Image: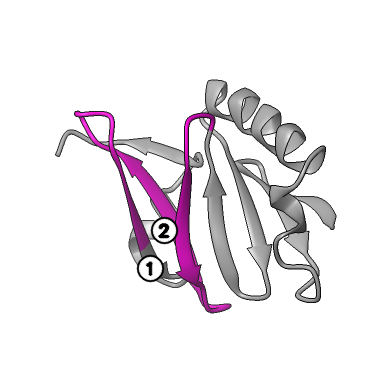
Amino acid sequence: MVVELEDDSRLLVRVDRATPNVWRTQPYYADIKRWARIAELHGQQVAVMVGRNMTIVMAEHDVDVGFVSEDEVVILSEKRDGSFSVSKIPRNDPRFAKVKTGIFRTHG
C-alpha cells in the first residue's frame, strides 16, 4: 500500500491489485478508519484505490464508488438526513471548479 495526499481534501491509499483486500485487514483498516475520523472533522476524505476502483472510507461506514476513470472526479455529498450520495463528474465539468473540500453538505 502507498499513502499519498491527492490534494488538500483527500488522502489516497493505493493498494496493489495483487492484494486487493489487504487494506481491510488489521492493523491497516484500524489506521485507515482513524485517518477517516480525523479527515471528516476537517471536511476531508480518505479514499482507497485498487486499480481504478475506489472506496471512500468514512468513520461510520465505507462507500463503494466503483470504477473511476482518469478523467472523472468523485464528489461525496452529505444529505440533510445524514445519508451520502456519490457523483462522478468529468474533471473538465465547470461544477468541479467550485469544489473546495472533500465532503459537501447539501440540503436535498
Query: Could you say which disc has been placed on residue 11 in the image?
Result: none
Q: Can you tell which quarter of the image residue 83 is in?
A: top left
Query: How many C-alpha atoms fall within 10 Å of the one at disc 1: few (<14), some, or many (≥20)?
Result: some
Magenta-colored stretch includes residue 72: yes
Tell me which residue sits at (41%, 58%) in the image.
96
The residue where tag 1 is placed is 89
Residue 34: x percent and y percent? 69, 27
* 61 left or right, relative to 5: left
Decide if residue 6 is in sight here.
no
Residue 53: x percent and y percent? 57, 70
* 47 left or right, relative to 18: left
Residue 73: x percent and y percent? 48, 64
Tell me which residue sits at (69%, 49%) in the image.
24
Asked which colour scheme the image uses, the reply is: one colour
Magenta-colored stretch includes residue 8: no
What span is colored magenta in the figure?
A: 59-87
In the image, what residue type sits under mark 1? Ile
The residue where tag 2 is placed is 96
| Labels 1 and 2: the sequence-earlier one | 1
